[in-house]
Image (cartoon, rainbow, N blue to C red):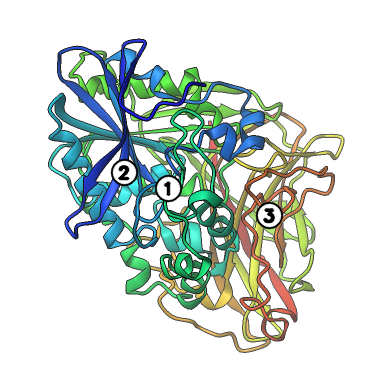
Amino acid sequence: MTQVNADTVVDGMVIEWDVPVEMDDGTVLRADIFRPAGAGSFPVLLTYGPYAKGLPFQAGYPSAWERMVAEHADPEKWVPHGYACIRVDSRGCGRSPGYISHFDDRENRDFHDCVEWAAGLPWSSGKVGISGISYYAMNQWLVASTQPEHLAAVCVWEGASDWYRELARHGGILCTFAEHWFDMQIKTVQHGLGEHGPRNPVTGQLVCGDETLDEQTLERNRIDYAGLLRDHDLEDDVCREHMPDFSRITVPLLSAGNWGGQGLHLRGNVEGFVRSASPQKWLEIHGLEHWTHFYTDYGVALQRRFFDHFLKGEDNGWDTQEPLQLQIRHVDGTFTQRAESAWPLPGTQWTELYLAGDELIPERGKASTVSFDALGEGVTFTTAPLPEQTEITGPLSARLFISSSTVDADLFLVVRAFSPGGDEVVFQGAIDPFTPVSQGWLRASHRKLDEELSTDYRPFHSHDEKQPLTPGETYQLDVEIWPTCVVLPKGYRLALTVQGKDYEYPHATTSRLSNFKNDLRGSGPFLHNDPLDRPASVFGGRTTVHLGGSFLRIPVIR
């Protein structure tokens, strides 16, 4: 392609490369602007994040690109539709200098000021919307809670909203994903890599800045993310700095999650929708890979209707549609679209299935116990063949009575489905092609509930103190299991596995994406295998589940 080192006009689109954006402390961030040529004022779609604006998707994430097998979402899908698109490299990443520290107050202030800067550009209509997936979605919750004056709407696509519960620690158990993500996706685009980093194939610019810094300087210019995650094992003020105040999110909101997003790309979209104070908010949940729907026709059309209404003022009926648009998932991997009025779904039949022997039964069974190695495979409880087609859509939970031979225990709960022939049903998840129906996690010493935020169907753990176990004593644990959707045909079985390690699909084949360190075997990159967080002396004993009163609660839709 022809290298471009100055502003240019291509097919009716003005492109401004590497535009300076000065922050309140004098740091100058860099942005690329794509806008319609000619006179007029245009609403702005803005993204702010660390993945380097000059690095094309297909170059930075080649295997993810190949899986999506679709065109990358680019300004050509928005500029001809009358929008200006701005992509800002966040502080310390790509062509923006500074110190890398994600999701903290400094980054939130930068993002806030970028919104206001974009609103004040000469050709801007003054209305700014934020659209993005993953990281570019996660920080939308935070900037929306700072209430920029000119922020008119946000589209949060598959982005966590709770830094502690969804990124750092699932149920209090350290997730190794964020440390590996920082190593493979942030350090590789840090500002100052210069000649050691990639080049923008369009402009010829060095993606990570013109200056090439030594490794010692690069290290001083970024947070020790692994240390941050490890040091804050309870939810403290540092953790809360990385999390939004939902009561201050009042902007029109479209939150889109992924049924297969266990570990990062689902719970936050549901929680953010439910808990945000916005009087105009919508929830959409779909399936397939993390990237597919955001970048292709279904997702683009949905986003356009939303932004056309709130950024352009078009009377397109968006404001009268139902608050929920769900892609109902079937065991063959297909989906049917359905509108709903609230979450959880009205008319949900909350159903308790009790653990008895190796079964899930509709009534409390006899008292008994079953034990397993606390770091091992665990035990599975299965229903009888379903007498009729059954839809399960919504949040799940479990109440387990357990004892441990040590002072703590980690519980990994996996909700699974099996065909009449005994084959397990797995789905193409947001990341992993062998994703089960749902998962939940809890460290027993973190069992304390936040009574204000907990409900019967969604226990909410405070994670503000540790409550060690007395070996041999029995404790009640209420475990949050992430939301799900599946229609099980007659004759299928539902199962709950309680174990002491990450789920692996027994028949997983070799599968890996270029931006992750591990093979994808059912839990994606969201693993909990850090030996320092789970020493065998504490977590390697025997865990006993006390049956009779223990149950799985599921949302059955009639």
In the depicted structure, whether residue 468 falls above or below residue 424: below
Q: Amino acid at mark 3?
A: Lys
Q: Amino acid at mark 2?
A: Arg
- Residue 190: x percent and y percent? 46, 54
- Residue 518: x percent and y percent? 71, 54
Q: Nearer the viewer, residue 261 or 459?
A: 261
Q: From where the camera sits, is residue 232 visible?
A: yes
In the depicted structure, whether residue 437 falls above or below residue 317: below
Earlier-in-chain disc, 1 versus 2: 2
Q: Residues within 10 Å of mark 3 (few under 14, many from 20)?
A: some
Q: Are marks 1 and 3 in contact (CB under 8 Å)?
A: no
> What element does badge 2 sit on?
strand
Can you name the residue that lies furthest to the bottom here?
470
Q: Nearer the viewer, residue 124 or 442?
A: 124
Q: Which mark is residue 94?
A: 1
> What element does badge 1 sit on?
loop
Q: Which residue is mark 3?
A: 517
Q: Are marks 1 and 2 in contact (CB under 8 Å)?
A: yes
Q: Which residue is mark 2?
A: 30
Q: Residue at x 28, y 22 (%)?
A: 35
Which marked residue is nearer to the observer: mark 1 or mark 3? Answer: 1
Earlier-in-chain disc, 1 versus 3: 1
